């Protein structure tokens, strides 16, 4: 009989890991290797092997994700050996599935499409896979290939996730990889302010690829109005940069109305993945320039005597457009 037959998630988990490692290689160079006065193009010429390795990892990740989907029908469809060679008859002994050859390339692609519902993924995926296969073969078989930029490789990674696993899948995989770090269990100080790392990741992607390209890979419309998250944008803390400057964190706005409508009373944060109820009323900041925001959050509930109804402390609200206090006790309407 055949033993150690794999499960779909065995392939899927390793496939996602290949893609995440391809991304991390590029992200690490762009965020750790750049030096003042050195051209980014020169840095990437020096690290060209990182881009080539990422292409190989993307190709491997795709094949594993395709195998995962085929395995949902039956892992036996992946075996690339004649049935007459299978040790499955009585008294033929056992053979481990891991010792068998499995299908790859065009055979795997055709088998994959035979196992999924017609039209369930974009027709563009076939051309996407072929493009990566050609690039990978040039790298593996000739140790060369066409010039490719880190932006190009990042797009290949994101589109692989989106084609095969759907919108949001790339970002969810990045977040899960971080939040599941075992260092969180022991209070690793370097991981204490974990959300800042995710703000850096998402800001990096938008800065490198542009909002329009990044928008293809999220269900939330990244082109819509953004707000501070009342949770991870409101925590105390600072980010100390390499040049010694200090910045309060997180500084980006990555919370969006859910649904995106003028009367929506829900807000969803892309970073911490929390949902918040909000009120729609005009912001009247206590100081500084006027704010046109109208997304207000109850930051701290007040204190009221349950018996007499006397208010000891009023509710505390903040505007998620400017993060300024909306307290009625200290309200000073800005003058023109």
Image (tube, helix red, strand yellow):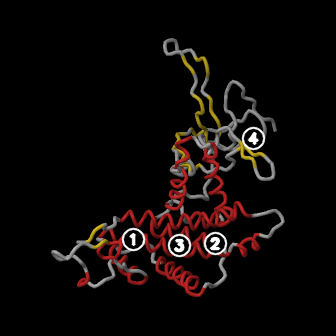
Say whether residue 236 is left or right of residue 37. left
Q: What residue is pinned by disc 4? A: 290
Q: Which residue lies under the disc numbered 2?
A: 50
Q: Quadrant of the C terminus?
A: top right
Q: Residues within 10 Å of mark 3 (few under 14, many from 20)?
A: many
Question: Is 207 on the left-hand or right-hand side of 131?
Answer: right
Could you give the CA–CA distance between mark 3 and mark 1, rounded to whole angstroms? 21 Å
**In terms of secondary structure, where does tag 4 sit?**
loop
**Secondary element at image label 1:** loop
Q: CA distance from mark 1 to mark 2?
A: 33 Å
Q: Residues within 10 Å of mark 1 (few under 14, many from 20)?
A: few
Q: Which mark is residue 58?
A: 3
> Where is residue 136 shown, x and y percent of the image?
55, 81
* Dot 2: element: helix
Residue at 59%, 74% (x, y): give it: 53
Of badges 3 and 4, nearer the viewer stands 3
The residue shown at (71%, 72%) is 44
Mark found first going from the N terminus, 3 or 4: 3
Residue placed under numbered mark 1 in the picture: 120
Where residue 168 appears, as percent x and y from the top left, is 51, 59
Of the two numbered discs 2 and 4 on the same chain, state the one appearing first in sequence: 2
Q: Residue furthest top?
A: 308
Q: Mark 3 or mark 1: name the one nearer the start of the chain.
A: 3
């Amino acid at each position: 009989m055949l033993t150690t037959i794999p499960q779909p998630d065995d392939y899927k988990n390793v496939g996602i890991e290949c893609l995440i490692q391809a991304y991390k290689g590029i992200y690490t160079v762009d965020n750790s290797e750049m030096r003042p006065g050195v051209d980014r193009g020169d840095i990437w010429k020096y690290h060209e092997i990182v881009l080539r390795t990422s292409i190989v990892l993307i190709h491997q990740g795709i094949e594993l994700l395709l195998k995962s989907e085929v395995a949902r029908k039956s892992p036996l469809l992946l075996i690339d050996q004649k049935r007459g060679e299978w040790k499955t008859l009585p008294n033929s002994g056992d053979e481990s599935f891991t010792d068998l050859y499995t299908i790859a390339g065009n055979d795997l692609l055709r088998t994959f499409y035979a196992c999924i519902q017609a039209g369930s993924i974009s027709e563009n995926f076939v051309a996407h896979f072929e493009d990566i296969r050609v690039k990978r073969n040039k790298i593996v078989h000739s140790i060369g290939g066409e010039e490719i930029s880190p932006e190009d490789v990042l797009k290949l990674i994101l589109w692989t996730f989106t084609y095969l696993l759907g919108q949001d899948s790339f970002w969810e995989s990045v977040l899960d990889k971080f939040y599941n770090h075992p260092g969180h269990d022991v209070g690793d100080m370097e991981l204490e302010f974990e959300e800042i790392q995710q703000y850096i990741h998402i800001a990096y992607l938008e800065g490198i690829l542009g909002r329009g390209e990044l928008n293809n890979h999220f269900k939330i419309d990244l082109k819509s109005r953004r707000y501070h998250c009342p949770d991870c944008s409101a925590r105390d803390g600072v980010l100390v940069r390499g040049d010694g400057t200090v910045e309060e964190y997180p500084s980006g706005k990555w919370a969006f109305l859910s649904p995106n409508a003028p009367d929506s009373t829900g807000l969803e944060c892309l970073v911490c993945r929390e949902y918040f109820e909000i009120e729609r009323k005009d912001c009247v900041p206590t100081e500084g320039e006027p704010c046109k925001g109208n997304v207000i959050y109850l930051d701290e509930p007040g204190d009221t005597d349950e018996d007499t109804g006397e208010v000891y402390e009023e509710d505390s609200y903040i505007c998620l457009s400017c993060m300024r206090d909306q307290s009625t006790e200290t309200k000073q309407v800005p003058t023109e």
